[in-house]
Image (tube, rainbow, N blue to C red):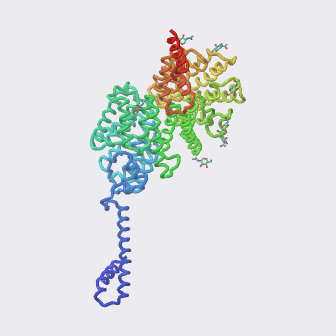
Amino acid sequence: MPREEHQGLVSGASSSGTDGTSKSTKTNHLRGLICWGIFAAFLIFFIIMAAVYTDPKRYKEAEPEDYLGEEDRVLYNGLGQVYFTPSSPKLNAMAQFQLGLQLMHLFWYDLAIQKFQQARAMDPNFAMAYWGEAMCYKQPLWQTEDLASAQAVLAQLKKSQALRYASDREQQYVAAAQTLFAANVSLQDRETQYAVQMRILWDDNQDDPDACALAALAVLGKLQSVGNYAASNAATLAQIAENILDDCVYFFPNHAGAYHYQAHMYDVAVDDWHLTGTPSTGLAASVKLAKLAPKSNVAQHMASHFYVRTGNWSQAALSNQAAVAASDSYCNAVEQGNACDADNRWHALEWQLFSQTQQCGAKAAYTSYTRMQAVAKSMNYTGDYGQWLYRSYAHMQLQSLNSLGIIPLRNATDNTTEMLPPPLYNTGGIENAVDIADHFWPPHAEAHALLARVYALTFERNVSQLSAPGVRSTVAAALARLDLIVATQTSLVANSSANADAASANADMLALLTTVQLQAKAVVGASECAAKLSSCNTTSWMALMDQALMLHKNVSRSTTLPSLKIAPTPEFYGRLLDATGGNSTLAKQLFMQCLDELPGRMQCLLGLARSTIKLNDLPSATSIYSKLQTQCALGDKTFPALLEARSRTASPPPPAKKGLLRRSLREQAVAATA
Ligand SMILES: *[C@@H]1O[C@H](CO)[C@@H](O)[C@H](O)[C@H]1NC(C)=O
Ligand SMILES: *[C@@H]1O[C@H](CO)[C@@H](O)[C@H](O)[C@H]1NC(C)=O
Ligand SMILES: *[C@@H]1O[C@H](CO)[C@@H](O)[C@H](O)[C@H]1NC(C)=O
Ligand SMILES: *[C@@H]1O[C@H](CO)[C@@H](O)[C@H](O)[C@H]1NC(C)=O
Ligand SMILES: *[C@@H]1O[C@H](CO)[C@@H](O)[C@H](O)[C@H]1NC(C)=O
Ligand SMILES: *[C@@H]1O[C@H](CO)[C@@H](O)[C@H](O)[C@H]1NC(C)=O
Ligand SMILES: *[C@@H]1O[C@H](CO)[C@@H](O)[C@H](O)[C@H]1NC(C)=O
Ligand SMILES: *[C@@H]1O[C@H](CO)[C@@H](O)[C@H](O)[C@H]1NC(C)=O
Ligand SMILES: *[C@@H]1O[C@H](CO)[C@@H](O)[C@H](O)[C@H]1NC(C)=O
Ligand SMILES: *[C@@H]1O[C@H](CO)[C@@H](O)[C@H](O)[C@H]1NC(C)=O
């Protein structure tokens, strides 16, 4: 509004009562005055609001979180303390950045990338927003990176003016990222130089918790690198990471990232690394993390890594239930669909499902499974969705004692005998042997689904079931597909011989895939023996399992991750011996080995109890069955393993009262006549 008009209005109002103007004019004047006043108030309000949004610095009382939408504000306050104050003058961009950084520390990468991009859109001169997005393209503990995307963001940063506005510390962060994503430098050199730079950054900025946490993560990243180059000085590196993390949590006790990385640190082969902390230090860090960051899936999930190690399945299930719920809560509110927080959400659902199978909770596990199935279907079984589904299917089949009958893999028609798991893995078109994301997990998931399918069609099936139409040909097709997967992996190991790192990672996976292939053949043979078919050849299937057991030694023992322990060889071998009435001494040894490697495995407890009975050690069997009963206290009341355990632990029936009474009456009569 023009300034003169405004002034005239004000002076007119002040003179109106004294210059004898009519009442109606006065009232009109007054009404006009009020209208204009309201209009002016709104105008001033809008001018202030506009100023706040374009230059939030002018609005001193505002906090960064005031610039976030409702759901984002909930996250901002539910992911641990925000420490980093970047040098962007715009509070709205700052808020997006800070939320992005919190999310990045909790491996919620997809959303973090969105937040860093929004921060950059709000303030194109915000160097740390570019930095954050680039850093999200490296997922050190997931062993993945998207180098091209990271380089593209850093190239845009270089083209922009943003670095001129960055503080010295921020320039150090950016320089470290440029090192991590340098073109034409080996993975080992990139990761090593990055860790050096982050260490210097932390030394130079002792009040910066993010520098502390990221310096430690850089070292953990080297230890767990796809490049696998750190084996010779792993203990030294691990001790460095431990020291940094001890500092981080001591000085910055509300930093979620520090606790998150500390938990990961103790979730590995700590014995070999001579660390001060132990897995229980990791559990304590996880519990603290879960409290600090109630809105993060990962923060809720982390403790289950430690509960799984000790077979504390009820806690593992609860932790993953909370993790899935944390993702659901945000994802449903923002209506982002099944892709929202997918990496964490469906990973936790797989773990929840597995923990449920270990408590004999077949129905609960099946509920998790049907959700996984619907999710995978909605995403057309692409990418990781197919893998989550296939692994869940394998967990269900191999742990359920067939108590659920046939479990459909993809849709209701897939449970017909002829149906094989449709291929997940393109055995023809492998281009880059170092790309673990593409060549590690898809064959692994598909191979286990094939094994589970063969198992479902043969294990504990009788003669007529084994000879039902389609069984033989389906089994043969599954075995042929497994042969192809193993052959491809063998060729991959040979082709990657020039790259020692890739060859070693590929060889590990080859060992695992080969055990799956051998076990699938063995279950077919053992089932023929169990069904007393004339084709039974015990020597033959046992030779396959002996071979698998040799290879099992080469499959990493240090991990208890459910996704990697779908069909552990000692458990599988022991169960085939049990089903065929084989050597109980050997079966008992195998189940004990299984429980030593994977405490609380439900099938191994059951198998151990059974083989102990066959070896006539009833008291031991009873105590093992009791343990199983406790573990399955919340499971399905009619789950076969639980029924079996209950029947074995039931105390002997009390002596019949009538008989006792009659005897005592007879004794009294005898006494009376005496
Ligand atoms: C990396 O190497 C490729 C092929 O040798 C070359 O074309 C490219 O320019 C190099 N990039 C950089 C940034 O040096
Ligand atoms: C599982 O963990 C919880 C929480 O730490 C503990 O209270 C419970 O005793 C544990 N249960 C078993 C069977 O170890
Ligand atoms: C799945 O496939 C259908 C049909 O081809 C398509 O319409 C849909 O967009 C796809 N969904 C996803 C998530 O790719
Ligand atoms: C079930 O899956 C199979 C193979 O993926 C497909 O051919 C079939 O059309 C599907 N059926 C339904 C009802 O979705
Ligand atoms: C396959 O699953 C559907 C739906 O669960 C069920 O109705 C059908 O009986 C099953 N068929 C077989 C052969 O198990
Ligand atoms: C095989 O098992 C099925 C399902 O339990 C049963 O219906 C059938 O009678 C059994 N056949 C033989 C020959 O035992
Ligand atoms: C290995 O290399 C050979 C020869 O170049 C090629 O034919 C084959 O497809 C490669 N194998 C894999 C799994 O990439
Ligand atoms: C059983 O299999 C073994 C090889 O594993 C073979 O040497 C042996 O001849 C077979 N026995 C029979 C009776 O076919
Ligand atoms: C296990 O790995 C070692 C070292 O890589 C190798 O020499 C050995 O042959 C492997 N064992 C089996 C059974 O493949
Ligand atoms: C059963 O297995 C045990 C342990 O492996 C072995 O010592 C024993 O000789 C086996 N017994 C028979 C009859 O094969």
- Against 437, is 133 above or below? below
**What residue appears at the point 40 percent right and 55 percent down from the top-left corner?**
68
Quarter of the image where one finds residue 109: top left
Residue 58: image x %, image y %?
31, 62
**Side of 120 relative to 446 (left or right):** left
Quarter of the image where one finds residue 531: top right
Residue 257: image x %, image y %?
36, 41
Residue 459: image x %, image y %?
62, 25
Which of 497 and 24 lies nearest the eye of the viewer? 24
Residue 162: image x %, image y %?
36, 53
Question: Is the N terminus in the top left, top right, bottom left or bottom right quadrant?
Answer: bottom left
Q: Quadrant of ligand 4?
A: top right
Q: Would residue 566 be seen by someone viewing this image from the given angle?
A: yes
Looking at this view, name the residue that lies furthest to the right: 469
- Against 431, is 519 above or below? above
**What residue appears at the point 31 percent right and 84 percent down from the top-left corner?**
12
Looking at this view, name the residue that lies furthest to the top: 674
Looking at this view, name the residue that lies furthest to the front: 673
Which of 293 and 440 lies nearest the eye of the viewer? 293
Which of 179 and 44 lies nearest the eye of the viewer? 44
Which of 200 and 532 lies nearest the eye of the viewer? 532
Report the number of discs: 0
Q: Would residue 193 be seen by someone viewing this image from the given angle?
A: no
